[in-house]
C-alpha cells in the first residue's frame, strides 16, 4: 500500500506489547469451519471465551438456539442481565464508564482489567444472541488482561488504553487466533500477514482486542440490499445486527456491530471503518459518538478495502472524550497528511467553551429530509433535534448561518463509478497478501457466493460485486480518472467554499450528508442529540475541512456537555424478520445491477 506512518506520542511509559498469540495451523477460533471433503460450511458454538471444538452443530440448529436465547432475554431477562453485569467486576459498576473512569478505578485497585474483561464477556454471552454485535471473541483476551494487570502492579502502564477492552470491526486484520473476513465465509481460515497498523498501535497503548464486531458483509459493497433498511448489518458469519434501542429499527451499516457493541456496553469503545457513512450512520442510530477522520490521518494498512481513495478507520464510543483519546492512538499519517503538524493528544481540545464565538453552518439542503435523508419512516422527526442542537449551540455563544455545500447528486454517481473500479483492483491486491485461502480475485468471491448461496445470499445477492467485475482499468482508465476527479473536486469545493467564507464547522441532520465529507476525504463527526418518543435515537453530523478534527472535537464536546442526552439502550420493539430473497433455488437470479442506497459502506 506504500503507507507511511509515525507512532502516536503517548503520555505514558511504553513497555513491550503482549505476544501476538499467533495461531497454529490447527487452530480454529471462529464460529464457522468448512468440511474439507464436502465443502459444507459448519458452525461451532462458543463456550466461555473459547470455542468448543467437539460440539459441531448445523446452521439451522444454531439459529434455533439463538432464537430461543433471544426469546428468553426479551421475556424479562434484560433487567436481570443489566443488574448482574453491573456487579460482575467485583463491587465496581463498569457499565457506561469512560476510559478515564476505568483507568482511575484500575489505578486505585477498585477494578482489575481481568474483572473488566470478564464483565464485558458476560454481557456479550448474554446479549449477543439478541443483538449479533460480535462475530467472535478473542480466546486470549483473559490471558492478555491478566498480563496487563501484572504489568500495572509492577508499575508499568503502556499507555492510555492499558487494560481497556475494545471491539474492532471484522475487516481490520489481527494477527492472533481470530479471523479477519469482512463477515464472509469466502475467506474464512485465511492467515493475515500481520496486525493492521492501527491494531499494533492499540496494543502498544495497552488495549485488549476483545473481539471482532459484526458488520454488513464486505462492508456493504456486495449488493444494493433490496430489503433495506433491513439487513444492512448482516453478514454470513455474524448474522443480522439488531439496533439496541429499538429492535425493529435499522442498525445501519456497515460498522453495525461496532456501533451497538459500544452502545450496549459490550466493550469500552470500538473501532469501525467508513467509505461513506459506515461510522457516522451506525453511531447516529445507536446514540453514540463516531468520528470519520480526514483521509490519511489513520493508516489503511491491514484493513480489507473498498477503496483507498475513501476508506478510513475511526473511533466509535459513548463520549466525545473517549473518541478523542482513541483518535490520538489511531493516528498514523499517510498520503496528503504526511508533513502536516498534528496534535499528540486530542483531549487538549475538550473545551466546554469551544463554541463561544464559533460560526456554525446549517447545511440547508439536508434540513429538507426528503432531499437526502434515510427514507426510513419517522427519521424526518430527527430534523427537529438537529434544529434544537443548533439553538443550544447559539446559547453557548455560536453564530448559526445558513450555508450550502452543493448538490450531492451532482457527484455521487461518479463516486460509485470510481468505487467500482477501485474495489475490483484493490480487493485483489488485498487477497494476494493472504495465505491459507484460494480466493485471489473478485471473480473468485463471486463464484464462492454462487457455490454457497444458502449461506451467503439468503437475503440479498451480489449485484455490486457483479457490476464491479465489469470495471477493469484502475487506475489508468480515462473514465475512472474523470469520475474520481470530478467527485473529489465537487465535494471538496462545496465544503471548502463554506469554510473559507468564515464558517468553522457545518451541521446536517441524522443520516444525511455523509457523502460530501466521505468523497472529499474530510472529517465528519456524528453526535447524539436526543432520543425520540419512539425510543429511537437522533444523531447529528458535524463536518469541516482537511485536518479540522481538533475544532470538531472541541465543538462536539461543548455541545455534548450542554445536551447530556446519552442514555443506555432499552431494547424496545420487536425484531422484524428479514424476507428470504429466494435466490438459491435452481437458476441464480442476481438481480439488475444499479446504484445501491448510499451512505452504508
Image: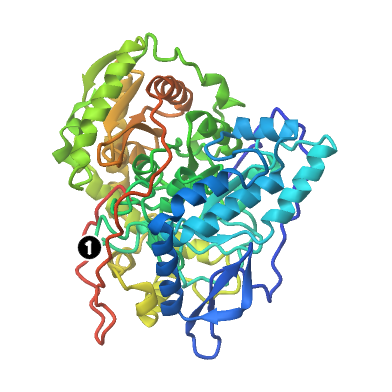
Q: Report the residue at 27% width, 65% height from top.
A: 578
Tell me the element at label 1: loop
Q: Is residue 410 left or right of residue 268?
A: left
x and y percent of residue 89 in the render? 65, 44
Q: Report the residue at 52% width, 28% height from top.
A: 321
> What sort of colour scheme is used for the picture?
rainbow
Q: Residue furthest toward the right?
A: 154
x and y percent of residue 464 in the render? 30, 63
Q: Is residue 315 left or right of residue 10?
A: left
Q: Is residue 313 above or below residue 336?
A: below
Which residue is more in the foreground, 33 or 331? Answer: 33
Q: Which residue is mark 1?
A: 226
Q: Tell me the crowding category of disc 1: few under 14, some 14 to 19, or many 20 or more residues within 10 angstroms, Cα based.
A: some
Quadrant in which residue 388 is drawn: top left
Q: Is residue 450 above or below residue 49?
A: below
x and y percent of residue 155 in the render? 83, 34
Q: Is residue 381 above or below residue 361?
A: below
Q: Residue furthest toward the bottom?
A: 37
Q: Is residue 488 left or right of residue 141?
A: left
Amino acid at each position: 500500500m506504500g503507507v507511511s506512518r509515525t507512532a502516536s506520542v503517548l503520555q505514558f511509559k511504553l513497555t513491550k506489547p503482549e505476544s501476538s498469540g499467533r495461531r497454529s495451523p490447527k487452530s480454529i477460533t471462529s464460529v464457522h469451519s468448512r468440511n474439507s471433503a464436502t465443502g459444507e460450511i459448519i458452525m461451532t458454538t462458543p463456550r466461555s471465551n473459547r470455542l468448543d471444538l467437539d460440539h459441531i452443530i448445523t446452521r439451522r440448529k444454531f439459529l434455533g438456539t439463538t432464537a430461543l436465547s433471544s426469546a428468553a432475554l426479551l421475556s424479562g431477562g434484560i433487567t436481570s442481565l443489566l443488574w448482574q453485569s453491573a456487579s460482575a467486576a467485583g463491587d465496581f459498576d463498569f457499565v457506561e464508564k469512560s476510559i478515564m473512569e476505568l483507568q482511575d478505578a484500575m489505578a486505585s485497585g477498585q477494578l482489575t482489567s481481568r474483572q473488566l474483561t470478564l464483565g464485558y464477556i458476560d454481557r456479550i454471552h448474554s446479549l449477543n444472541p439478541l443483538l449479533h454485535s460480535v462475530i467472535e471473541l478473542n480466546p486470549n483476551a483473559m490471558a492478555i488482561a491478566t498480563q496487563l494487570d501484572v504489568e500495572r502492579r509492577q508499575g508499568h502502564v503502556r499507555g492510555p488504553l492499558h487494560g481497556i477492552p475494545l471491539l474492532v470491526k471484522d475487516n481490520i486484520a489481527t494477527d492472533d487466533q481470530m479471523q479477519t473476513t469482512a463477515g464472509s465465509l469466502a475467506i474464512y481460515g485465511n492467515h493475515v500477514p500481520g496486525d493492521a497498523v492501527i491494531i499494533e498501535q492499540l496494543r502498544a497503548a495497552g488495549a485488549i482486542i476483545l473481539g471482532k464486531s459484526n458488520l454488513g458483509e464486505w462492508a456493504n459493497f456486495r449488493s444494493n440490499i433490496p430489503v433495506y433498511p433491513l439487513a444492512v448489518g448482516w453478514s454470513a458469519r455474524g448474522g443480522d445486527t439488531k439496533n439496541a434501542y429499538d429492535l425493529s429499527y435499522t442498525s445501519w451499516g456497515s460498522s453495525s456491530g461496532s456501533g451497538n457493541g459500544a452502545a450496549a456496553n459490550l466493550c469500552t469503545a470500538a473501532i469501525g471503518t467508513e467509505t461513506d457513512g459506515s461510522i457516522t450512520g451506525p453511531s447516529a442510530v445507536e446514540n453514540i459518538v463516531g468520528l470519520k477522520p480526514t483521509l490519511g490521518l489513520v493508516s489503511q494498512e491491514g484493513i480489507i478495502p473498498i477503496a483507498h481513495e475513501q476508506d478510513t478507520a475511526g473511533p466509535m464510543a459513548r463520549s466525545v472524550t473517549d473518541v478523542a483519546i482513541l483518535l490520538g492512538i489511531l493516528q498514523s499519517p499517510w498520503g496528503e497528511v504526511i508533513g502536516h503538524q498534528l496534535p499528540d493528544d486530542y483531549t487538549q481540545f475538550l473545551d466546554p467553551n469551544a463554541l463561544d464565538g464559533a460560526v456554525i453552518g446549517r447545511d440547508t439542503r439536508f434540513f429538507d429530509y426528503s432531499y437526502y435523508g434515510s427514507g426510513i419512516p419517522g427519521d424526518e422527526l430527527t430534523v427537529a433535534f438537529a434544529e434544537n442542537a443548533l439553538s443550544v449551540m447559539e446559547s453557548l455563544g455560536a453564530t448559526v448561518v445558513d450555508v450550502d455545500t452543493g448538490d450531492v447528486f451532482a457527484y455521487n454517481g461518479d463516486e460509485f463509478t470510481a468505487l467500482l473500479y477501485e474495489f475490483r483492483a484493490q480487493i485483489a491486491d488485498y487477497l494476494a497478501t493472504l495465505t491459507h485461502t484460494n480466493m485471489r480475485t473478485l471473480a473468485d468471491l463471486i463464484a464462492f457466493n454462487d457455490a454457497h448461496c444458502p449461506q451467503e445470499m439468503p437475503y440479498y445477492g451480489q449485484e455490486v460485486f457483479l457490476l464491479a467485475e465489469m470495471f477493469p482499468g484502475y487506475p489508468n482508465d480515462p473514465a475512472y480518472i474523470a469520475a474520481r476527479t470530478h467527485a473529489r473536486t465537487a465535494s471538496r469545493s462545496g465544503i471548502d467554499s463554506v469554510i473559507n467564507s468564515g464558517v468553522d464547522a457545518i451541521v446536517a441532520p441524522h443520516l444525511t450528508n455523509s457523502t460530501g465529507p466521505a468523497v472529499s476525504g474530510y472529517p465528519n463527526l456524528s453526535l447524539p442529540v436526543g432520543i425520540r418518543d419512539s425510543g429511537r435515537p437522533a444523531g447529528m453530523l458535524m463536518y469541516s475541512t482537511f485536518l479540522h478534527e481538533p475544532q470538531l472535537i472541541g465543538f462536539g464536546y461543548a455541545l455534548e456537555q450542554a445536551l447530556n442526552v446519552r442514555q443506555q439502550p432499552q431494547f424496545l420493539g420487536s425484531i422484524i424478520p428479514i424476507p428470504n430473497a429466494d435466490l438459491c433455488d435452481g437458476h441464480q437470479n442476481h438481480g439488475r445491477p444499479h446504484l445501491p442506497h448510499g451512505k452504508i459502506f
